[in-house]
Image (cartoon, helix red, strand yellow):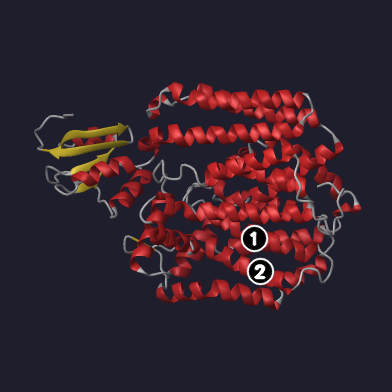
């Protein structure tokens, strides 16, 4: 948040010629983008309770042609708005069956966020900040995780970053330079945000922008954010689906707006209770391995707020978009890590700006460089120790290459940090994280897949389903939803006294409980304690494998 650049105008258009080292950063950024956004998207199945449900809804939408009401196995599912389902359904139609279609909205969302925030960096901070951002963003933990998650968080984030990229010029550029097109685009981006997540889109973007407008000394620009053109475009984009789904489903307002927005925020009914400070550690982890630079951002922000440099400051505007979502959801009675994902792209842009300022001022270079190295070395130790990997079916030695990669990158960063060479620290860190993720995708995830996803056990159950019914027993909802997605139908709970020969997906404990209840069981396949495939036999039969 330095005030070294003119605060109210875009940075002077930087020349396109790059030094050899800058071309090296471009190459690392390209590799990081490939690994984060495209590599290994199908080496593991759908994970958790949300991915298989969202994917099943999108697949059904593509097959049924009903693009209004999200449905889960024929029943209206009104917890989330429509944008994720539309994009994923289009993915199923274009790409066919598979995890890639389900994860397509997050891939596109990550790319859009990077392009929109990168454009802001180019316009307001110059080439160095933009180049650093393109390296930092795809190599951060938040991007590495959420770019491959079939959830609504990433596509929602991209709509907010689009809104940010349009709101910032409206507020801080000289009168008349950001014309009506920015207002129209701002309204359209807010409409997409509401289609992605609901009223939270307007609340987060609107509140962040209003607070930022006041702090940067442009309160009169608030009215442009609520101009007739912005409101009209917002209504044109968002209203049709909300009207149609409300007419088709009278319960929509109660289920979506009241239960899954108001009650989710005000009450712990959804059992996602966390302490007030929960998002502090979440953001530190999300920004890793670049978290050490938060100190520089905070220092520059405090200095900017205490001077006239805050007048029209793009950095302060971005900071408001970082802080408000974190503060808002810290008050919520339901907290999940993905809720603050919209804070990540502007935070990383500010981190990139802080690194660029440090390069200019040559201040605290060694300390920050070595702090980054320390983060890498800590991650290396975590991989080398790798607690619990044997219980997941992975030999401890299988994760050691990841630890070795991170360790070498950490030592390299330590060397360059001690020599006050900051750009090599950035390059080495990003390259180490990227290569570690590549190693993870190519070698570890296929091994872990049966232990984190139901894909393999569902394939085995499906092969047996032609000659026997399939049931579940004692499954966690994570596995229940996954089995149903891959079998393409609801799976009923096994009841004692059911027919012999039934295929039951259960757990190790569940198989024992079935036997204690008088059901003979034969182990067909035992993948882990959480995924066991059994065939029921006569009540007097022994427990067999």
Front residue of 33 and 328: 33
Residue 185: mark: 2
Residue at 47%, 37% in the rendered image? 441
As drawn, the residue found furthest toward the right would be: 308
Residue at 28%, 54% in the rendered image? 490
* Image position, residue 388 (x, y; %): 44, 26
* Image position, residue 320 (x, y; %): 73, 54
41 versus 227 height, above or below: above
Q: Is residue 77 visible?
A: yes
Front residue of 224 and 30: 30
* Left or right: residue 83 compared with residue 114: left
- Tags 2 and 1 in contact by the CB under 8 Å rule? yes
277 versus 9 height, above or below: above
Residue 205: mark: none
* Left or right: residue 72 compared with residue 519: right
208 versus 349 height, above or below: below
How many labels, in total? 2
Q: Secondary structure at mark 1?
A: helix
* Left or right: residue 421 compared with residue 345: right
Q: Name the residue beneath numbered marker 1.
A: 162
Query: Label 2: few (<14), some or many (≥20) within 10 Å?
Result: many
Query: Which tag, 2 or 1, sits closer to the chain's start?
Result: 1
Q: Secondary structure at mark 2?
A: helix
* Image position, residue 79 (x, y; %): 45, 60
Which image quarter holds the C terminus? top left
**3D distance between C-alphas at marks 2 and 1:** 9 Å
* Image position, residue 442 (x, y; %): 45, 35
Front residue of 427 and 290: 427
Residue at 86%, 38% in the rendered image? 361
71 versus 298 height, above or below: below
Q: Is residue 79 visible?
A: no
């Amino acid at each position: 948040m330095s005030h070294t650049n003119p605060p109210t105008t875009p940075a002077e258009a930087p020349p396109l010629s790059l030094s050899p080292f800058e071309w090296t950063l471009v190459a690392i950024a390209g590799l990081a983008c490939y690994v984060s956004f495209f590599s290994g998207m199908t080496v593991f199945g759908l994970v958790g309770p949300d991915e298989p449900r969202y994917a099943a809804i999108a697949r059904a939408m593509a097959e049924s042609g009903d693009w209004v009401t999200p449905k889960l196995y024929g029943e209206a599912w009104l917890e989330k708005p429509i944008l994720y389902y539309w994009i994923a359904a289009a993915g199923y139609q274009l790409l066919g069956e598979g995890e890639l279609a389900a994860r397509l909205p997050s891939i596109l969302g990550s790319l859009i966020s990077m392009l929109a925030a990168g454009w802001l960096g180019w316009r307001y901070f110059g080439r160095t900040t933009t180049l650093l951002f393109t390296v930092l963003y795809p190599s951060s933990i938040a991007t590495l995780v959420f770019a491959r998650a079939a959830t609504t968080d990433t596509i929602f984030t991209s709509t907010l970053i689009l809104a940010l990229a349009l709101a910032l010029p409206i507020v801080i550029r000289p009168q008349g330079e950001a014309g009506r097109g920015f207002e129209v685009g701002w309204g359209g981006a807010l409409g997409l945000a509401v289609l992605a997540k609901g009223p939270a889109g307007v609340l987060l973007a609107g509140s962040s922008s209003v607070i930022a407008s006041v702090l940067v000394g442009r309160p009169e620009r608030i009215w442009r954010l609520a101009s007739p053109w912005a409101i009209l475009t917002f209504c044109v984009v968002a209203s049709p689906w909300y009207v149609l789904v409300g007419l088709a489903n009278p319960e929509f307002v109660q289920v979506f707006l009241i239960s899954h927005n108001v009650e989710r925020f005000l009450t712990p009914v959804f059992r996602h209770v966390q302490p007030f400070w929960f998002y502090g550690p979440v953001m530190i982890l999300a920004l890793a391995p670049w978290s050490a630079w938060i100190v520089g951002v905070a220092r520059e922000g405090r200095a900017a707020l205490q001077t006239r440099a805050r007048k029209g400051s793009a950095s302060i505007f971005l900071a408001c978009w970082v802080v408000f979502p974190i503060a808002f959801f810290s008050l919520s009675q339901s907290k999940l890590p993905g809720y603050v994902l919209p804070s990540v792209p502007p935070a990383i842009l500010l981190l990139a700006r802080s690194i660029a300022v440090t390069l200019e001022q040559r201040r605290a270079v060694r300390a920050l460089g070595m702090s980054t190295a320390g983060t890498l070395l800590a991650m290396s130790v975590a991989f080398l120790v790798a607690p619990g990997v044997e219980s997941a079916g992975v030999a401890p030695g299988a994760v050691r290459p990841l630890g070795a990669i991170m360790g070498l990158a950490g030592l390299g960063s330590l060397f360059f940090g001690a020599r006050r060479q900051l750009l090599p620290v950035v390059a080495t860190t990003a390259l180490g994280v990227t290569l570690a993720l590549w190693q993870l995708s190519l070698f570890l995830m296929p091994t872990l897949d049966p232990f984190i996803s139901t894909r393999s056990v569902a394939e085995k159950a499906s092969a047996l389903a032609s000659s026997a019914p399939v049931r579940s027993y004692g499954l966690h909802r994570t596995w229940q939803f996954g089995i149903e997605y891959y079998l393409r139908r609801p799976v009923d709970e096994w009841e004692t006294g059911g027919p012999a020969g039934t295929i039951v997906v259960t757990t190790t404990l569940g198989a024992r409980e079935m036997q204690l209840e008088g059901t003979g069981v034969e182990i067909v396949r035992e993948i882990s304690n959480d995924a066991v495939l059994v065939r029921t036999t006569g009540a007097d039969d022994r427990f067999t494998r």
